[in-house]
Image (tube, rainbow, N blue to C red):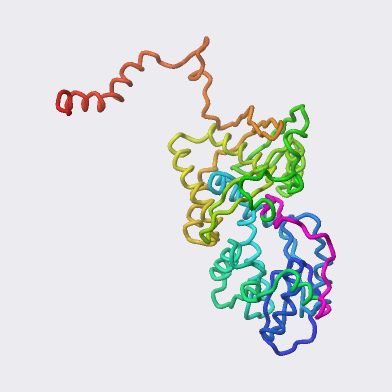
Amino acid sequence: MASSKSKKKSGRKKVVLAYSGGLDTSVAIRWLQERYDLDVVAVSVDVGQPDVDMKDNIDRANRIGALNAYAIDAKEEFVKDYVFKALKANAMYEGSYPVCTSIARPLIAKLLVDVAKKEGASYIAHGCTAKGNDQVRFDVSIGALAPDLGIIAPMREWVMTREEEIEYAKKHDIPIRVKKQCPYSTDENLWGRSIECGVLEDAWQEPPEDAFQWTVSAGKAPNRAEYVEIGFEKGVPVSMNGKRMDGVSLILDLNEIAGKHGVGRIDHIEDRLVGIKSRENYECPAAVTLIAAHKDLEKLVLPKDLLKFKAEVDQKYAELAYDGLWFSTLKECFDAFIDKSQEFVTGTVRVRLLKGTAQVVGRKSPYSMYDTGLATYAAGDQFDHTSAKGFIYVWGLPLKTVAAAHKGKGK
């Protein structure tokens, strides 16, 4: 955790601000000082978002007037305690996309709370709007971890357009990045990239190519397939193509490999927690590939009843993550169940990447329940065919009994 040196104490109460370095949170530093008479401690968290200069964030926050500024590299913690937990649960919100933004928010909230306790702060502030899901995730997570801390959301309070924010920044000598305004609203971490707003708000219009950065279109992807072999231990990916890798490196490398084959583009209508239907687009090359591989390995090693029940838990798990309930007791109990279910989810899965698809084409495990002797129709068949007639009789007896009882008694 890198931080600037604290300035002279003013005697005012402190607020810890989730600081991205962008326009909104840069303006928020000065606005919190003026509106609430608070000393601001800025905290920037690296969860794998590309092209973010954490040192620059510290310098920028200090120039604006923050009492202190922290830059936290949280990629390893994010992968170990959030991404891989979600992967073991095959967490796909509404069955459509891997939860990505929603699982980064509770980690950031936890780190904000940690800094608040260290600094003796009374409040935590964030730059979420009143229409999105993130405000819920931050507020609920902070409340679960530190119910004594107050929460301030400047963008729920001030009434400023983007142009008015820029004027506010100029008036108060707030250094802001001068760059071409993106026509989309995006959020990125190493598990996924979300894209919304602009022309994407027209649910009928196909997403333009300039909305995507991590993936190529299927039409421009290579014509030749590429194969990747993912090694898992207890549900966690630990190697790729025979090379043992740490989680962060594996995900970043797989994002690049799968992305160049157009894997991981998702376009769907999403039910937001606040009751709004929203058209959302995502890029999740590594996540889509790893979830496909993990689910297939589970089919190889887990019994039928566990697979069926776990699918229900997985769905609920994704909803809890999306709804900001990462630190709930129910989610904690699900973690215990899922960890137990992963005891034998060890093996290797071969995935073919081609023209926007990640298709599992091979799998093996020391705990495989697939028995060739039972499954084959060729020589070596070990299945007892004589048992089939008795099984069918017992299995179908209830239906036969009902049919006999109702015969001739219907209308």
Instruction: Inspect the magenta stretch and tell me whether residue 303 lies in it.
Output: no
289 versus 154 height, above or below: above
- On the image, the x and y values in percent for residue 45 come to 72, 63
Location of the C terminus (image quadrant): top left
Q: Which residues are magenta?
A: 170-196
- On the image, the x and y values in percent for residue 239 come to 71, 39
Location of the N terminus (image quadrant): bottom right
Q: Give the residue at x 81% y 80%.
A: 171
Q: Give the residue at x 69% y 35%.
A: 356
Q: Give the residue at x 66% y 64%.
A: 108
38 versus 143 height, above or below: below
In the rendered image, which quarter is residue 237 located in?
top right
Q: Is residue 407 left or right of residue 10?
A: left
Closest to the observer, 329 or 268 = 268
Closest to the observer, 320 or 96 = 96
Q: Is residue 329 left or right of residue 145?
A: left
Instruction: Inspect the magenta stretch and tell me whether residue 195 lies in it.
Output: yes
Q: Give the residue at x 84% y 73%.
A: 175
Closest to the observer, 395 or 130 = 130
Farthest-out residue, bottom:
11
12 versus 43 height, above or below: below
- On the image, the x and y values in percent for residue 313 come to 48, 47
How many labels, in total? Answer: 0
